[in-house]
Image (cartoon, rainbow, N blue to C red):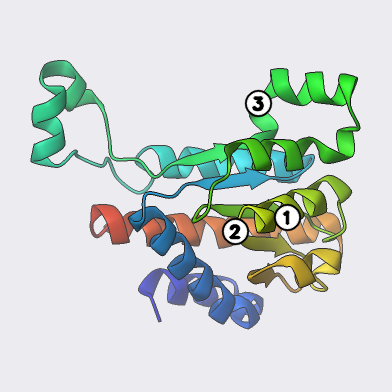
């Protein structure tokens, strides 16, 4: 077991039921990033905020600054090389405000994340669909669009997984049923994943 995952379970024992799925998700994301794929994220309300949060942890240093490899630093040169960091490509779909609002005004808003997934996603990419109930219609449609694009679909839900469960390659179902309690578990889960990925791609992080 990865030491970050072991630490997560030590701090949050109820999440031990999710350990195998968290490890599997880390492998899916690692494979996608190694193949130059990207991560799309979506959710509503607090889950939309979580989408943005996760992308923020992946697109810059999280546990530590990610110094660029010498070859990249040479390409950039000077101040750019000194001030940029290694990044893992992640796009939080709820934050594309102009498109989200335009689509909601002009079209059926239930399909907005499906539209963005279809437009941005490509074979080999990954969709992280976050919904506490597992039944958010716009998230379910996004999962369908991702499958049509031959993307992997990862779910982050509450205990049942809802309708999303059947659409996922892996669904991390935290063992709670109330929305706020589910969200309280989602944060340490995705922080763990981000730390695992950061260590995989950018080196060991001091605990």
Mark 3 or mark 1, whichever is nearer to me: 1
| Nearer mark to the viewer, of 1 and 2 | 2
Q: Nearer the viewer, mark 2 or mark 3?
A: 2
Helix, strand or loop at label 1? It is helix
Q: Are marks 2 and 3 in contact (CB under 8 Å)?
A: no
- Eyeballing the image, is 64 above or below 23? above
Q: In which image quadrant can residue 68 be found?
A: top left
Question: Gap in Å between the C-alphas at discs 1 and 2?
Answer: 10 Å
In which quadrant is the C terminus drawn?
bottom left
Q: How much space separates mark 2 and mark 3, taking CA atoms?
A: 23 Å
Near mark 3 (Cα within 10 A), the count class, few <14, some 14-19 or many ≥20, is few
* First in sequence: mark 1 vs mark 2: 1
Of residues 182 and 149, the one drawn nearer to the viewer in this rendering: 149
Q: Which of the 4 quarters of the picture holds residue 60?
A: top left
Mark 2 = which residue?
A: 150
Q: Position of residue 117 (x, y in %)?
A: 66, 42
In-front residue for pair 8/51: 51
Name the residue located 60 percent from the left edge and 81 percent from the top edge.
16
Which residue was labeled with disc 3?
Answer: 96
Give the Cα separation between the discs numbered 3 and 1.
18 Å
Tell me the element at label 2.
loop
* Badge 1 density bin: few <14, some 14–19, many ≥20, Cα 10 Å: many
For image coordinates 64% across by 82% down, the residue present is 17
């Amino acid at each position: 077991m990865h030491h970050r995952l072991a630490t997560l379970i030590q701090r949050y024992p109820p999440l031990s039921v999710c350990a195998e799925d968290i490890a599997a998700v880390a492998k899916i994301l690692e494979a996608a990033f190694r193949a130059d794929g990207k991560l799309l994220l979506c959710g509503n309300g607090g889950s939309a905020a979580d989408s943005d949060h996760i992308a923020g942890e992946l697109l810059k240093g999280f546990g530590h600054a990610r110094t660029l490899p010498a070859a990249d630093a040479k390409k950039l040169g000077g101040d750019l090389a000194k001030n940029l960091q290694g990044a893992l490509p992640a796009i939080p779909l709820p934050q594309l405000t102009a498109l989200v609002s335009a689509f909601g005004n002009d079209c059926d808003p239930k399909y907005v994340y499906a539209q963005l997934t279809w437009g941005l996603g490509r074979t080999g990419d990954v969709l992280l669909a976050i919904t506490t109930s597992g039944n958010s219609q716009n998230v379910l449609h996004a999962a369908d669009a991702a499958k049509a694009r031959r993307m992997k679909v990862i779910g982050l839900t509450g205990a049942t997984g809802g309708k999303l469960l059947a659409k996922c390659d892996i669904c991390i179902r935290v063992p709670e049923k109330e929305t706020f309690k589910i969200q309280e578990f989602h944060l340490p889960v995705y922080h763990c994943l981000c730390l695992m990925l950061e260590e995989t791609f950018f080196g060991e992080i001091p605990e």
